Amino acid sequence: QLQLVESGGGLVQPGGSLTLTCTPSGIDSDFYHTAWFRQAPGKEREGVADISHEDRQTTYADSVKGRFTISRTTLQMNSLEPDDTAVYYCASGPGVEVTPLLGFTYRYWGPGTQVTVSS
């Protein structure tokens, strides 16, 4: 089993930066993927970024390319925009099961952390 807890959310002004951290406890395999998803009020959940633990290959949604950077435990978010406001969730799962950014293929999820981009 793997438990995930997100931290680092908060209020930031447009154009600002924020770093989210995903802290795992339990089995965290080198053959897993870690990803970040987000869900804004009234919108569908959106896959934001994914990283393979094994080869560090990354996948990003077009909406965040060039602004967000994922590592095994963090999501660095730069040039934040009001449309980035959402609850952000960390997710993880075995690489043999995961299709990057496809939510139902991830086995483990954190409870989420709120990110609000507003002046």
Image (cartoon, rainbow, N blue to C red):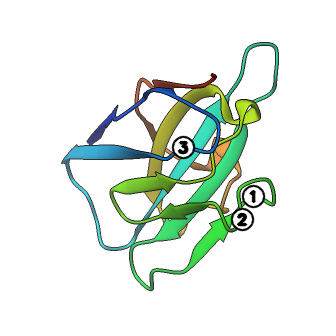
In this view, the residue in front, 2 or 15, is 15
Residue furthest front in the image: 119
Which residue lies under the disc numbered 3? Answer: 16
Place residue 46 in its image quadrant.
Answer: top right
Dot 2: element: loop
**Mark 2: amino acid:** Lys
Q: Residue at x 80, y 27 (%)?
A: 44
| Camera-nearest label, 3 or 2 | 3
Could you give the CA–CA distance between mark 2 and mark 1, rounded to whole angstroms? 6 Å
| Camera-nearest label, 2 or 1 | 2
Could you give the CA–CA distance between mark 3 and mark 2, rounded to whole angstroms? 16 Å
Label 1 Cα crowd, 10 Å radius (few <14 / some 14-19 / many 20+)? some
Residue furthest left in the image: 26
**Mark 1: amino acid:** Ala
> Left or right: 116 with respect to 27?
right
- Residue 109 at what x, y percent from top left? 45, 35
Residue 40 to residue 5: above or below: above
- Residue 26 at what x, y percent from top left? 17, 46
Which residue lies under the disc numbered 2? Answer: 65
Split into 4 quadrants, where in the image is the N terminus?
top left
| Camera-nearest label, 3 or 1 | 3
Which residue lies under the disc numbered 1? Answer: 61
> Left or right: 15 with respect to 23?
right
Q: Residue at x 71, y 51 (%)?
A: 102
**Mark 3: amino acid:** Gly
